[in-house]
């Protein structure tokens, strides 16, 4: 989880958060803009961030998150993975690998709720 626009957040601190996310290479980031909650310490803090700035920072962080997610998922594409098969449709089984990346592979085996160690592709990979 990353909160953008917390009271007092400077542009430099926001950029530092972006840099940390890049270095870590998160597979998924849940991003949300800070919003005031009544009767909290943050409500009384100085330096509340303008809504336009929070929106702009949120968009930038979401763009980075999408880029990082694509790179993370690409690392699993066409590799041998252990897949928990959840669905089968027209010769294609789909499920999730051990890292909760959606995967699919071709098979005639229609059994579900089983693990398969197979060469698989990332599902809906672009």
Image (tube, grey):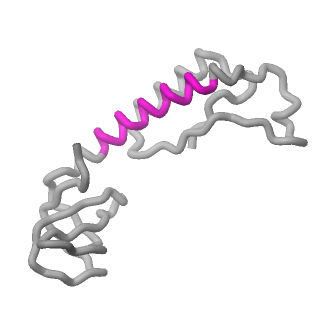
Relative side of 75 to 27, left or right: left
Q: Relative to residue 65, is residue 118 depicted above or below?
A: below
> Which quadrant of the figure has residue 13?
top right
Quarter of the figure with the C terminus: top left
Quarter assignment of residue 5: top right
Q: Residue at x 83, y 22 (%)?
A: 46
12 w.r.t. 97: above or below:
above
Measuring from the top left, give residue 16's x and y in whole percent: 53, 23
Residue at 81% x, 34% y: name it: 42
Residue at position x 23%, y 48% in the image:
125
Q: Is 57 left, or right, of 121 in this rendering?
A: right
At horizontal 29% and vertical 63% (from top left) the residue drawn is 97
In the shown orientation, is residue 7 left or right of residue 72? right
Q: Which residues are magenta?
A: 54-72
Our reading of the magenta stretch's main secondary structure is helix
Labels in figure, total: 0
């Amino acid at each position: 989880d990353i909160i953008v626009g917390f009271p007092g957040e400077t542009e430099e601190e926001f950029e530092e958060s972006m840099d940390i996310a890049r270095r870590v290479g998160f597979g998924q980031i849940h991003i949300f803009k800070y919003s005031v909650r009544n009767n909290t310490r943050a409500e009384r803090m100085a330096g509340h961030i303008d809504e336009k700035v929070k929106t702009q920072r949120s968009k930038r962080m979401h763009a980075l998150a999408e880029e990082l997610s694509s790179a993370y998922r690409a690392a699993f594409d066409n590799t041998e993975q252990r897949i928990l098969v959840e669905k089968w449709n027209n010769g294609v089984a789909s499920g999730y690998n051990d890292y909760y990346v959606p995967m699919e592979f071709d098979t005639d085996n229609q059994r579900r709720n089983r693990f398969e160690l197979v060469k698989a592709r990332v599902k809906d990979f672009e």
